[in-house]
Amino acid sequence: MKKNEKLLQKIFECLADAGRKPQLFEPGEQLFWNDPHISKSMLDAHLNPNTDGASRRAGSIEKTINHLVSTSVIKQDDKVIDLGCGPGLYSSRLCMHGINVTGIDISQRSINYAQKKAEELGLSIDYICRGFLDIDYDGVFDCVLQIYGELCTFSDEARNRLLGIIHRALKDEGRFIFDVSTRNLRMREGATNNWHFSDGGFWRPNRHVVLEQGFDYPEHDAWLNQYTVIAEDGEIKTYRLWFHDYSLSTISQVLNSNGFEMEYVWSALDGAEYKAGSDWIAVAAKKL
Ligand SMILES: C[S@@+](CC[C@H](N)C(=O)[O-])C[C@H]1O[C@@H](n2cnc3c(N)ncnc32)[C@H](O)[C@@H]1O
């Protein structure tokens, strides 16, 4: 078959498959956080102080750290691990408050940036490039942080495995501080069925087409943002970003059945008072 015919066939197969609703938590393309181009786009998004793209805006990060430290949810002599630290926007601010921080992230590009920044600022932070599920600490930390809804990206089985790893990493009565999104946010911000052409952008450096789809799994409180990227050179990849949203009652149950008790709840980690129907639920939970 000629090259063009093969490509056309691939595109048709991909378009035919785009109509299929994937199985719950069916994986897509694996290389995302460490893709040479996407990781660069992500780092740019993390470092943009004016958007909530990959990290929240600078003002919100500042407010969050001030809240957690001033209320002693994180104490001066605590040993803290920041899971999914990205380029270290929270870790570095905690360190400036004199707190001992370890930052873990799967993105080598983000960790390289975080290490360089810490060196420039004279901050002593232990940054490690590793997956959440590959850490192995036993009773080491006073607090585990996981910020910007990362817990929502896991299936129930993987989430419980991660909660077990976090539980083990904490000292007795240590705190797990995190936030999860709610269905409220998803109904507004979940991907819609759409497509666009780009001369080069977030997904690829050169010309490409993106088919964007949103799939709802209401009986599981889950949502899939699916992006099929068709590049000019004929490469076709499907990226799946899964979200398991929570309510106050479902996240409390999950914590209780994994050895935690909810100590504080807010609508945001900056200390905003919890209100039913909020987009986010922010929690500090104690290891039992
Ligand atoms: C939404 S970003 C949030 C980053 C940071 N917490 C913040 O709010 O600025 C999620 C981060 O988790 C990291 N990440 C995703 N999956 C991971 C995994 N399995 N193990 C470790 N890090 C992961 C990504 O590289 C990314 O930096």
Image: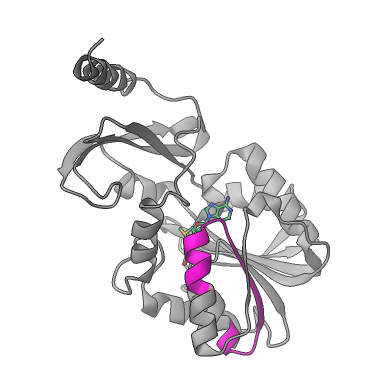
Q: Nearer the viewer, residue 145 or 216?
A: 145
Q: Is residue 270 visible?
A: no
- 200 to 18, vertically: above or below: below
Task: Let me know if residue 101 is in the magenta part.
Answer: yes
In the rendered structure, the answer to whether residue 45 lies left or right of residue 274 reads left
Q: Residue at x 62, y 53 (%)?
A: 131
Residue 93 location in percent, x, y?
52, 83
Magenta stretch bounds:
95-114
- The residue at the point 36 percent across, 52 percent down is 37
- Residue sitting farthest toward the top: 1
By what rule are the colours in the image chosen? Answer: one colour
Q: In the rendering, at what x and y percent does residue 155 appear? A: 58, 39
- Look at the image and say whether residue 53 sits in the magenta stretch: no
Which residue shows up at 49% across the image and 25% down it? 23
Report x, y in % for residue 86: 50, 65
Q: Nearer the viewer, residue 256 or 130?
A: 130
Residue 222 place in picture, x, y as percent? 47, 38
Looking at the picture, does residue 118 appear above or below residue 218?
Answer: below
